[in-house]
Amino acid sequence: MIVFLSVVAGIILLSGFFLIFNPRFGGKASKNKLRSFSQSVNFSENKFVNQIPTPNNLDAKNLMAILREYWKGSSRRTPAHSLPVMAVNAAGLQNQSQTRMIWFGHSTILLEIEGKRVLLDPMFSQRPSPFPKFGAKRYSDTLPIEIEKLPAIDVIVLSHDHYDHLDYDSIMKLKDKVRHFCVPLGVGSHLERWGIEKKKITEQDWWAETEFERLRFVSTPARHFSGRSLFDHNATLWCSWAIIGDITRVYFSGDGGYGPHFREIGQKYGPFDLTLMECGQYDQRWSAIHMVPEQTVQAHMDVKGKMLVPIHWAAFSLALHDWTDPIERVIRAAREREMLIATPRIGEPVIVGAVEYPHSVWWNTDQTPKPRTAQQQLQVKRVPN
């Protein structure tokens, strides 16, 4: 018994040291920061909270069912082959006059807006995990462009601190070419531990605004949660973002369930020329924290979006649905509402306000229609459920 207890104590001790000294888990807020968080309506009992009930329904019964489904597996949960990627030429990223976005899969987006380069939730690693050899593997073997070849980034925007959105290795490779970081409350502590100067970080509560050289970054509500280990659940805030220039307005949903906040965001900051909306990694058992594709379309309408680009899919399997289910459902729902929706390949640019935009069904090699104009898409007949 003494030997057994000694082994258990040793394992606990080693685990504690691992959590403390492994930088991938990030940093903890100082006492001064925690005192400042207490001024936020989103902070209660030393944790950040949602403003409406947000159950995850992951009780023991559901967890066992999820494990059984995961163990059973499905050939449709991941692509049969590595996904095609369109290469991005670094020279083409210099002095871009048009407002455009380039999608890297999942929720990583390079946004070129009114002369600035903004990188959203940069995750360039092969697995969203604190353990680089374990976890869901990226669907594509390559990236549109390697981090080392990216030009200087004006602002990195982070929505929350989960591994598929805040990646240690990506930040470490990017940090010296980034001028500023806009993040939710508490996330700055991770960046500070990773060697980023405090003066380069702006931490924001919901509805707070920061201006960076004529661009406004508004931290807007989301319905989600945070945490990078077993011991920091909801220690940092989560959010969506409104990015507002003199001419163009872009909305980035980050992660989250559907709720009344979308309509409020639309009323305060809409209409948006482009919305980048989560549409994947959902399940009915956690629908409060990840909306389903039909809700993605409704959220786009709530924020008064003009063009929708679905994100949070086509990189990792973090749920049990077929990997193409998100995009097929969101397209069907968008057509029923006669909405404009772009479906770029990974690495394919979408130009805001252009006559033509990416609209191929590249995930299905049997269907490759030509790009549609906005006018042509609005003429698409309603399709049945």
Image (spheres, rainbow, N blue to C red):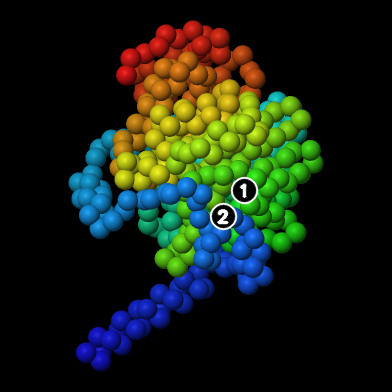
| Above or below: residue 60 compared with residue 77 | below
* Of the pair 72 and 205, the residue shown nearer to us: 205
Residue where numbered disc 1 is placed: 206
* Of the pair 136 and 90, the residue shown nearer to us: 136
State the CA–CA distance, disc 1 to disc 2.
Answer: 8 Å
Q: Residues within 10 Å of mark 1 (few under 14, many from 20)?
A: many
Residue 217 seen:
yes
Q: Where in the figure is residue 251, as x and y percent of width and height?
A: 60, 34
- Residue 4: quarter of image: bottom left
* Of the pair 30 and 5, the residue shown nearer to us: 30
Q: Where in the figure is residue 336, as x and y percent of width and height?
A: 41, 17
Residue at horizontal 36 percent and vertical 51 percent from the top? 56
* Of the pair 47 and 330, the residue shown nearer to us: 47
Residue where numbered disc 2 is placed: 42
CB under 8 Å between callouts 1 and 2? yes
Residue at horizontal 22 percent and vertical 54 percent from the top? 61
| Above or below: residue 138 compared with residue 131 | above
Judge left or right: residue 86 versus residue 289.
right
- Residue 130: quarter of image: bottom left
Q: Where in the figure is residue 291, as x and y percent of width and height?
A: 42, 38
